Every structure is written in structure tokens, then in C-alpha cells.
Amino acid sequence: MAARSHPGWPATLRSRNVELRPLRVRDGGAWSRLRIADQAWLSPWEPTSSVPWEQRHTPWAFQALRMRLQSQAREGSVLPFAVVYGDEIAGQLTVANVLRGVLRSGSVGYWIARRYAGRGVMPVAVALVVDHCFGRVGLHRIQVDIRPENTASRRVVEKLGFREEARYRRYLDIDGAYRDHVGYALTVEDCPEGLATRLADDAGR
């Protein structure tokens, strides 16, 4: 039943030095170290929580998160990936809110550790997951919602050709308040050649 409701999962996707794969038990230590070290870098874009940052990002917190995402992946509502650069975890990417039926859509969210930012890791990762979603997973539309102030994240989707489609007022409870977001989207018709191919072609020009 899970395979029928969520084709294309589990999956490992690769291009250049970037790999997307399911989260593993042994990722907990590296994930925790990255998240705790990068609190100032990551927290402005994270959901509001009353739990202190370090408590939310222990290896044990990671295992609870991994198990929850694993359960949701089996149900067909998410595709949760570790982002690996070389041989090291560099971040995380999740396709959430996966809907079938007439919509066939999903929402992409991601973070990358500060030390890996600016190396082109996340554009490759997003391109890989969009191609996978439009291929084996069978989705038609991918959306990414980003705070207007998050220029680094907006550069990722704009580089890949996502359309800015909406401005949402006080949309999500992020970093202590309901924040405005910019809605970006792509449909399968927008990139028939594939985003990874488009990205490689742009890099070669």
C-alpha cells in the first residue's frame, strides 16, 4: 500500500558531489553538531518553539524527528532527505504536504550548514528532488515558500527558474511571530528537460 501511495520512495539521488538519501540513525551526531553550531544562521528561518534550541537539536531529538519523518514517508505525505556533500552531511531537504488526486503537489523546505553555503550544494539538491518528484514520484507542481528577507534561499529557487507566484501576509509562525512569505512554484511543464540538466547547462555557459 505504501509503495502505491508514494512511488519513488525511498530513493537516493546523486549529481556531482551532492547526494540526497534517507536519514540514517548514525546521522544523529553530525546533524546535532551542525544545528547547534549554526543556531544564529538557522534560527531566523525556523518554526517558533518554546523548547530551547540545544534541547531541540540533541542526537536524541534527531532520532525522534527521523522516526516521525520515516512514518510520514511510509504514509506518503513526505519525502525526507539528508543532503550530503562529499562524504559529510551538509543539510536537510524535505518534500512535505504531498497531495495526490487532481493536485499532485508538494512543498519543498531545506536548510544548509553555514560552512557549505555558497558552494552550489542546495541548487543541485533542489534540482535533483524536483526532477525526482516530476518523474518517479508523479507530482505536477512543486512549491517553495520563503521569507522575503531570506535572500540566500530565494537565490536558490530563482536560479532554478521557479516563478514568484504570491505574497502571503503573516503566513507561518517563524522565529517568534507570523511572518510574510513569498510563494514560488514550478510545474512539470516548466522544465521538460529536467532541472538538473538545465542547471548543468547554465553552469557550462
Image (cartoon, helix red, strand yellow):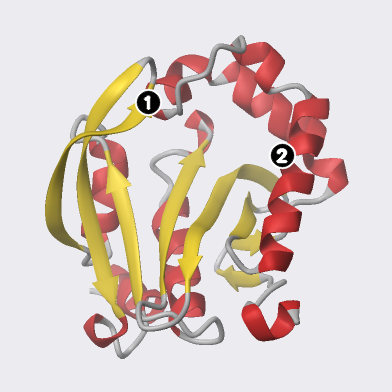
Left-right relation of 163 to 100: left
Position above or below: 15 against 58 = below
- The residue positioned 47% from the left and 59% from the top of the image is 97
Q: Position of residue 65 (x, y in %)?
A: 71, 39
Q: Which residue is mark 2?
A: 65
Q: Position of residue 119 (x, y in %)?
A: 43, 47
- The residue positioned 60% from the left and 70% from the top of the image is 14
SS assignment at label 2: helix
Task: Kindly indicate whether the residue at mark 1 contacts the one at mark 2 (C-beta within 8 angstroms).
Answer: no
Can residue 116 be seen?
Answer: yes
Position above or below: 187 against 94 = below
Q: Nearer the viewer, residue 1 or 131?
A: 1
Left-right relation of 91 to 153: right
Q: Position of residue 175 (x, y in %)?
A: 39, 19
What's the amino acid at mark 1? Ile
- The residue positioned 67% from the left and 13% from the top of the image is 54
- Category of crowding for the residue at label 1, using alpha-carbon neighbours closer than 10 angstroms: few (below 14), some (14–19), many (at least 20): some
Position above or below: 86 against 161 = above
Left-right relation of 77 to 109: right
What's the amino acid at mark 2? Leu
Q: In the rendered view of the protein, which quadrant contains the N terminus?
A: bottom right
Total number of numbered labels? 2
Left-right relation of 108 to 23: left
- Category of crowding for the residue at label 2, using alpha-carbon neighbours closer than 10 angstroms: few (below 14), some (14–19), many (at least 20): some
Toward the front, the furthest residue is: 101
Position above or below: 70 against 194 = above
Q: Position of residue 153 (x, y in %)?
A: 31, 43
Q: Which residue is mark 1?
A: 174
